[in-house]
Image (cartoon, rainbow, N blue to C red):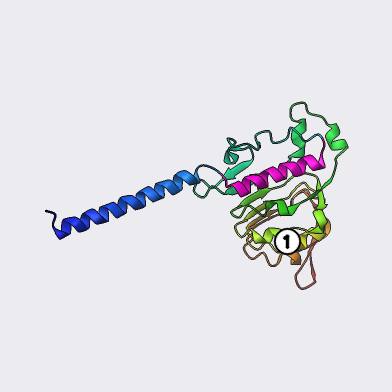
């Protein structure tokens, strides 16, 4: 016969083991990879590339739509190992990838500018780092700007350097209040930089404006700082 103490301890041990088992299941499931919605989101981005460049069929070869392809193991994608959600997308210089095997300087002589579809990134709720640098973007689909990225509350690092976005894009960048690092280098910006457009980025720690041709900064009050 078990005493009441022994029965209580056995009950507690069973509950403890049950919780350990549940936690292990969560971790195992989390390591399986990104969720279906985000997998489809990545494939939509690949389709977007093909829509903009007829020679883009071979870009991102690991991004394959089948039942055995694990999207968290795809190139340029890093997932949170616990939740399985995408946390980093390194989508820099995507369109230049086609010249990596046999480098062709004519790519830079005949650059094709194209429009960014920001809505493609909305499925990635845990996205922390987004690198879109050096992709020859010079505008947006339907002129939506970066405003829609403000719904990604965990986005802290955004790199859009090496593109051709003009100063009109900066106002929409100011809506992404979660940003801590914003890279705007090598964008051909010149003259006075409208710093007041970014005043709402209260979490911002790093603002990279290197390799532009800026002469001054337009302050929040409307004055100009040299």
Name the image quarter holding the C terminus: bottom right
Residue at 61% in and 55% down: 125
Residue highlighted by disc 1: 147
Residue 94, how many percent across, how many down?
Answer: 73, 39
Residue 152, how many percent across, how many down?
Answer: 64, 58
Q: Is 36 a magenta residue?
A: yes
Hey, which quadrant is residue 122 in on the image?
Answer: bottom right
SS under mark 1:
helix
Q: Is residue 91 visible?
A: no
The part of the chain drawn in magenta is 34-54
Q: Note whether 74 is above or below 154 in the view shown.
A: above
Residue at 69% in and 36% down: 60
Q: Note whether 67 is above or below 14 in the view shown.
A: above
Q: Is 99 a magenta residue?
A: no
178 or 196, which lies in front?
Answer: 178
Residue at 82% in and 29% down: 104
Q: Main secondary structure of the magenta part?
A: helix
Left or right: 129 as drawn, with respect to 47: left
């Amino acid at each position: 016969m078990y005493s009441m103490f022994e029965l209580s301890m056995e009950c507690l041990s069973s509950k403890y083991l049950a919780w350990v088992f549940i936690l292990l299941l969560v971790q195992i499931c989390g390591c399986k990879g990104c969720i279906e919605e985000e997998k489809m989101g990545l494939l939509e981005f690949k389709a977007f590339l093909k829509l903009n460049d007829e020679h883009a069929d071979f870009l991102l070869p690991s991004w394959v739509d089948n039942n055995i392809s694990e999207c968290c193991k795809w190139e340029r994608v890093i997932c949170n190992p616990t939740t399985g959600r995408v946390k980093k997308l390194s989508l820099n210089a995507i369109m230049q990838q086609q010249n990596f095997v046999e480098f062709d300087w004519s790519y830079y002589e005949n650059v094709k500018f194209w429009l960014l579809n920001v809505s493609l990134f909305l499925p990635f709720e845990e996205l922390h780092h987004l690198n879109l640098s050096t992709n020859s973007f010079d505008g947006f689909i339907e002129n939506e700007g970066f405003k829609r990225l403000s719904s990604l509350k965990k986005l802290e690092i955004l790199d859009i350097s090496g593109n051709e976005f003009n100063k009109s894009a900066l106002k929409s960048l100011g809506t992404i209040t979660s940003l801590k690092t914003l890279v705007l280098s090598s964008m051909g910006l010149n003259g006075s930089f409208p710093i007041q457009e970014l005043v709402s980025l209260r979490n911002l720690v790093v603002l990279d404006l290197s390799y532009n041709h800026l002469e001054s900064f337009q302050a929040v009050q409307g004055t100009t700082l040299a």
